[in-house]
Image (cartoon, helix red, strand yellow):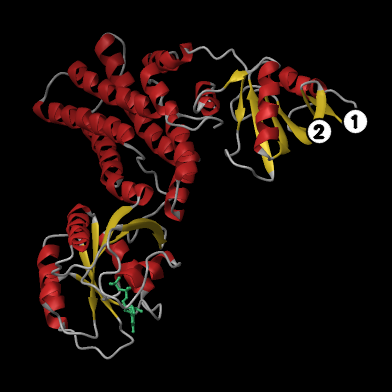
Amino acid sequence: MNGGRLAFAILYYFEVKSMTQDTTIAAIATGNAPGGIGVIRISGSNAISVAEKVFSPMDGSRLSDLEGYRAKYGTVIIDGKGSDNGVALIFRAPKSYTGEDVAEISVHGGMLVVNKTLQAVLDAGAVPAGAGEFTKRAFLNGKMDLTQAESVAELISAQGEEAMRASYSALQGSLSKKINAVLTQLLDTSALMAAWVDYPDEEIPELEEAQLKKTLTHCIHQLSRLLASYNNGQTITNGVDTAIVGRPNVGKSSLMNMLVGKERSIVTQIEGTTRDVIEDSVTLDGIVLHLRDTAGIRDSGDVVESIGIERAYKALEDAELVMAVFDGSEDLNRNDLQLIEKCRGRNAVAVINKSDLKQSIDMDTIQQSFDNVVTVSAKEGLGPEELSACVRDMLGVADFDSTAPMLANARQRQNCQNALDCLTQAMDGVKTGITYDAINVMIDGAADQLLSLTGKKATTEVVNNIFSKFCVGK
Ligand code: GDP
């Protein structure tokens, strides 16, 4: 009876449910640039009647007579005149992205046509959609939870394949499933404890302390694992700030070009060509590295070059990953030794370049100074695989499984941490023998945090904040 009561209470816990959503909204769903096709998306109870005012099917039928998942070819009417041919696609509530009636009108993708069609849709009674409003409605209508909604934004902004896979996995509900599994155990335990405390006269079996400890241990373990994988997830989704440093002419720009796969930095034989910091992002084995190719580090009287060198040192200090480049065909000189010093205590890999030439570098010194050493020839394109394997290893993501449940952002991490803290307290409480109703408060506290994480109990503020970061049209 208590389990039922609790579940019932949770179902009606949705503060966010009170957010009104009775307007019909519209926005351009495709990018803000000319393309082959532009899509205007309309959602709300009047979506189909609004679409009907700007779109007439060629076969004389009416969009409002169309079943869901059906499309019609027809004329787009702007300012009362047929202005383009397009396709209207109809989704009927609740079988749509938002869970409402949805119409999508595809027109030719010139920005004028697309903007004019949107204006016609607005004139026909829709209002402009706010940032992320389609996805927000999908959330409010129970089509997805908050972790899935957030993964939509991440999928859009994903740069690396691993990040894309991880976001897709979250969209499929991998994190929700994991959180809900923990939540179910907590709620069951809480219900049992509440029943036993509230109705001592009924014949409700007392929860065995051993069973309680087992459940808490299991939940603590699950949440701890999620938290432990957070940093790796961040590395994968946000990319890694990487500095390429070394004295002039060792091949920093060539290395960057090899990694980026195009002539991004200027490669010349004149020392000091890269006067400032050049930035680019590259995907190395699925991980995004934000590369900074810096000015060659050497003693310089040139003012501009000196500023560049200072920035190179700054980039080195700020970087999460340092690629210290050395010329394998030359002996280490004073500038190389200075760089070795600067790399001490940093997450640095020594990249010994020019492996295609006869080698004369003192490898003993390099091996003693760096935990990670890779030999490459940027010119010949040799060694990128070894470098990427080494980088994955250094970042601790060598065995990263992008399909595993993963906390995707600081909000989710905080909720998870708070839940874990409550459960750790509860476990300490069990060990010290405090009363079950006090322990139950802690378990409920943990459940609350997990409900916030998935959005079943999230405040209006949190929800608005999440969707404000989306683009319009999503
Ligand atoms: P940076 O000053 O460190 O950025 O060095 P660059 O990338 O501009 O390269 C300096 C010179 O070294 C250029 O002439 C490159 O062609 C040459 N170079 C770069 N990498 C290699 C390599 O792997 N092998 C050989 N033989 N030459 C290279």
Q: Viewed as shown, does residue 473 lie left or right of 166?
A: right
Query: SS for tag 2?
Result: strand
Q: Are marks 1 and 2 in contact (CB under 8 Å)?
A: yes
Residue 456 locus on image (x, y percent): 42, 22
Q: In the picture, which quadrant includes the N terminus?
A: top left
Q: Tell me the quarter of the picture where residue 415 sits.
A: top left
Distance of label 1 from label 2 (alpha carbons): 8 Å
Query: SS for tag 1?
Result: loop
Rendered-image quarter of ligand 1: bottom left
- Disc marking residue 327: none
Residue appearing at x 73%, y 23% in the figure: 51
Looking at the image, tell me whether mark 1 or mark 2 is earlier in sequence order.
1
Q: Nearer the viewer, residue 239 or 151?
A: 239
Q: Which residue is mark 1?
A: 59
Residue 406 locus on image (x, y percent): 37, 43
- Disc marking residue 72: 2
Q: Amino acid at mark 2?
A: Lys
Q: Nearer the viewer, residue 403 or 88?
A: 88
Residue appearing at x 71%, y 22% in the figure: 120
Q: Is residue 172 above or below residue 162?
A: above
Q: Nearer the viewer, residue 229 or 471?
A: 471
User: Can residue 14 be seen at all in this image of the molecule?
Assistant: no
Q: Viewed as shown, does residue 411 lie left or right of 150?
A: left
Residue appearing at x 45%, y 17% in the figure: 11
Q: Is residue 91 above or below residue 357?
A: above
Residue 41 locus on image (x, y percent): 64, 29
Residue 245 locus on image (x, y percent): 23, 65
Q: Amino acid at mark 1?
A: Asp
